[in-house]
Image (cartoon, rainbow, N blue to C red):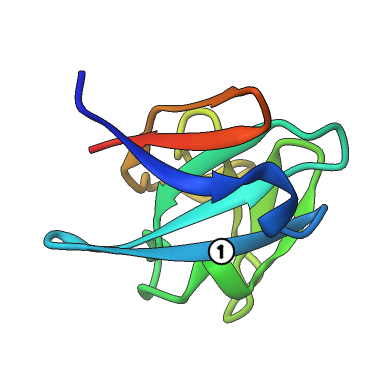
Amino acid sequence: MNWTEIGALTDIPSKGSRIVKTPEGDVALFRTATDDIFALFDQCPHKQGPLSQGIVHDNRVTCPLHNWVIDMASGQATGPDEGCTRTFETKVENGIVYLAL
């Protein structure tokens, strides 16, 4: 696996996100209230809304455009909505966040 160092865990706001530019497009890294880190392609499966601007709650993010709720572990839309966005593996070692690209 090719791990890319992103930066300190504290660089990502609690219950917030940070964007990482990649050749394939923007990846949103999310930090939960319990300091879990998730990474999703920064497009909602519904209308490609910027998930990075959504509201983080538990292990989910709500898209700011049409309130679709995305499970950050699987990338799947929840509830009656159907769709999926790409997920990326992450890890935290010694307070440093890494992203698998």
**Residue shown at 80%/54% (left/top)?**
15
Query: For this view, does 4 lie left or right of residue 76?
Result: left
Residue 35: quarter of image = top right
- Give the total number of marks visible in the rendering: 1
Q: Which residue occupies the extreme bottom position in the image?
A: 65
Vertical relation: 43 (above or below) 50: above
Vertical relation: 54 (above or below) 75: below
**Residue shown at 45%/39% (left/top)?**
75
Vertical relation: 15 (above or below) 91: below
**Residue 14 horizontal/vertical position (percent):** 82, 53
Residue 32: quarter of image = top right
Which of the pair 87/67 is nearer the observer?
87
Rendered-image quadrant of the C terminus: top left
Q: Residues within 10 Å of mark 1 (few under 14, many from 20)?
A: some
**Residue 22 horizontal/vertical position (percent):** 22, 60
Q: Secondary structure at mark 1?
A: strand
Rendered-image quadrant of the N terminus: top left
Q: Which residue occupies the extreme left position in the image?
A: 23
Which amino acid lies under the numbered mark 1 shown in the image of this protein? Answer: Arg
Q: Which residue occupies the extreme right position in the image?
A: 33
Query: For this view, does 28 lie left or right of residue 67?
Result: left
Which of the pair 14/55 is nearer the observer?
14
**Residue shown at 55%/38% (left/top)?**
38
**Residue 97 horizontal/vertical position (percent):** 54, 37
**Residue shown at 68%/57% (left/top)?**
11
**Residue 27 horizontal/vertical position (percent):** 37, 57
Vertical relation: 60 (above or below) 100: below
- The residue identified by callout 1 is 18
